[in-house]
Image (tube, rainbow, N blue to C red):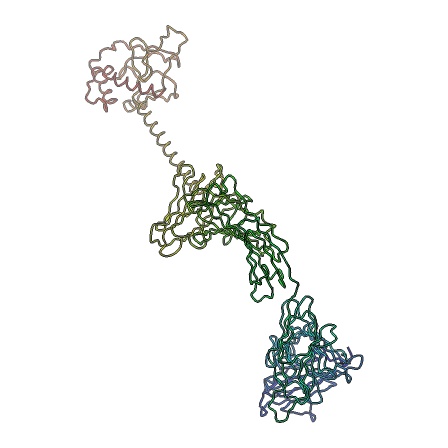
Amino acid sequence: MTSTGCGVLQFWGLLASAVFVLSAGVRLTITPVQGTTLIISQSSEVSRRSACTICNGTDLKRTCSSSGIILTNPKAAESVEFTCPKPEEVFTVTVVWEIECTMKSCNGDITPFESDTGTLPLQKFNRTFIWNLKAPVSRAFHLNFNQMGLRQIHPSEQCPDQHTYTLLAHQDTGEAAIGTYCRNGSVSGAQVLNQGRFSLEIPGGWKLKPTVFNVSVGEEIKSLAVLKVILPEGTSSSMFLSPNYPDSFPDDDQVEWEFMVPPKHNTTVLFLNSTQPQCLKKEPAVEYHYGNMPFAVVKKLSDPQPTQRRESFSMILRNCEMNKIGISSNGLSVRFQVSANLWSLPVLCNVDLRNEQGLTLYIRKTSPKSNCELKLNSFIQENITIPSGKISQLSFQDCPRQKLILTASRIIECHQWKDCPAATAPIPLTVPVLESCLPAHLANIDWTLRPPQQGTVELLPLNGSLRQSLPGHKCYGPDIIIVDDEEHGTTVGQFCPQGAISKIQVQTKVSIKASIKGGENLQPHSHYFLKISFTKEIGERYIFTVRPKSGFPTILATPSWPMGMKSFSTVSWIVSVPSNKEAHLLFTNISQPKCSKQHTSIRVQSLGSLKEMYSQQEDKKADREITISESFYLNMSNCMPEKGDFSVLTEITLLHKDKHPPLTIILSVVAAIVVLMVVVLAVICSVIRKRKGQLSHQVSVYNPNGTNFLPGHNRSYPKSGRDDQDESPIYACIDETLVYSHLLLDRVELGVRDLPVDVYHSFTGPTEDNALSLGTVADIPEVGIYQPFVPPSGVSPHTHNGPLSQELSMVNNELYGGIHSQSQPENMFTKQAPMLELEAEDLNGEQR
């Protein structure tokens, strides 16, 4: 770049500015780039009587003007003052570069624009950047727009990014507007004869976007301008305007467009609008030059223009010498369109479906405006249906793969059970192998399964299991299987591999659609699909066999989810629960309708005994979760809804029986333990009370034969010590204080000492003055040695008369008054025998 290089980047980079807000205006300090001219002028849209002026200079050299100022090659910074607070509403800014080319090069280039100009106050002004270009006589200057491309627009239009480019050519008779352009188009360059101007306009407040283009010396051309156009690949359409459009093209001049057409593309030229001049000499015409053709194809403006040409070409619009005197003619103007599309030779393909029973293929275009040409048996058709059992001849021209969709359908039906695939030998739903000459891959296939009347279709996944694709639980694999109820016209569900559903039974005609996400070819994925069989009628409309897996919940949804089930339709899930597991069943989403006939029903029954574990209708409230420890049926049926729909979402989770029991089980166990403890405690207390009651009636019974025995023992008398010298007597421990304590005198008066517990001691109390004394024991017997009873002298064991009899009667009344309050005391031992025998039997039984 030379010292006079005049890129906008240099301009903004060297434009040091400072802003000062005055009481009535704005002051700017600016320094234009060397080799440029900075013009601040009053906008043509502002009234000339505007009070805003611009001043520059200092002291005596200070000048002010309401029309504007021009700063050319300043040597120092210039201070500019505006007398209004918003000068951008009154003035516009124009920056001008002068670029002159020699025979070999130009003394300046149009360099890239940098977008960072937001800190400059001039960004608020409407700005125009102008490059005045001049080439040697008979030569042209060349502008290259390869890196951004331009798109021609009508002069009244606006560009989306507000960056509007204009190219002008200078003629002896004046300026000719070659065209107005926006960014991002097919125009990649332009050559303008001798001299011209290129400009960019940006409204105030918009930043300058990066732009890359340059200028160089062009060729010797005979036209006013030559525009180079590179058409994009694929289908495209570009619009072009003649110079000065909608006004007349210059008199007796010409302009040329060079169109670069991609390989294997056809082009068509169409005149959308044109006006004819009144000519003095020659006639306006259009010339077409194709490739290496030695001659041009010449067309009048009114002739049909070339169509479906398969090579690059140039188009020259040529004007006549017009009659401009007294003729009300608009002159020559043309608006035309150049469209391109791919071309190819016809592709022939023979499809043989004689061995594919029930299979039909469909080929259709993705867009009705496509240029693809389809033929079936030499007849052009918009869409092709290839019938089953025949050989069909197909032809495809200009039909890329992305413009076509290939699908297939197969019908599997049987009218008699002997011809149907049985459950013991199901048949796989395989994807057919198709001819490789077809221009598109198989996007999806639809199987229609029709069993005999009152028959059932069974679906078994080839990969072992399926799962439903539901909101929040969508399939992440590539395969999608949609099962439809053909008779009801509803969807049973959308499924994908790797789940808990091992079998699906549908009591009707079934339609199954299989596809791959993203529209990929189905043929490599045929092993993912189903096996089918036909069986007798089942009790429900739909039955699913489910084997939940441990570790994550199994989600089940009613048919047509999230839509409601069909009226009066039923569905069942047969759920297998391992013996060491239990199933936690949770109804996460239940939508109940208002029924006009019958009721909706949700029931859970044991698989073995059909015991009902759960039941719910739409008019009743029930728990939404239960725990089941065995395999079960989950059955649902719909009513005739008057309002609303019936749909249910169920979640099944397997848990170990010995791990993480539900809270209800824990509370039940704790409650049972507490109740058991209370019962045991009550029994213990009852036994203690009974034993104490029994012990309170146990007394020693005197036997005149010299043998003592206790009530409650066996009625056989113990052996005498004389018969067996080693036999030792056995005594039951009797707490005598519990029996006689309320009859005894004060322990201190009687001289009773505390004796060891559970050790037998003879009575050592007073024996002479006490009416209860039955004799005196001279010596205390040894513990554990049997001592026969020796009555005291003067006392007979058989008669009790006088005071002693009265005292014994008192004792008897105290001891047994509660039972024999009316008995006479004359023979207490004989009177109490039956009772003692009963108590002895009770005690004997208790000891045993």
Quick check: 132 left or right of 510? right
Q: Is residue 437 placed above or below 579 in the rendered structure?
A: below
Nearer the observer, 174 or 309 = 309
Q: Residue furthest right?
A: 104
Quick check: 381 left or right of 105? left
Q: Residue furthest top?
A: 723
Nearer the observer, 617 or 1 = 617
Q: Quadrant of the N terminus?
A: bottom right
Q: Quadrant of the C terminus?
A: top left
Q: Is residue 79 visible?
A: no
Q: Is residue 54 placed above or below 607 in the rendered structure?
A: below
Q: Is residue 732 visible?
A: yes
**Image x and y of residue 546, in percent:** 48, 43
**Image x and y of residue 296, in percent:** 71, 77
Residue at image location 61% in from the left, 93% down from the top: 326
In this rendering, the count of numbered labels is 0
Which of the 4 image quarters holds residue 828?
top left
Quick check: 732 left or right of 52? left
Which of the 4 image quarters holds residue 276?
bottom right
**Image x and y of residue 208, in percent:** 65, 76
Q: Is residue 370 placed above or below 765 in the rendered structure?
A: below
**Image x and y of residue 255, in percent:** 69, 81
Nearer the observer, 193 or 430 = 430
Nearer the observer, 564 or 508 = 508
Which of the 4 image quarters holds residue 261?
bottom right
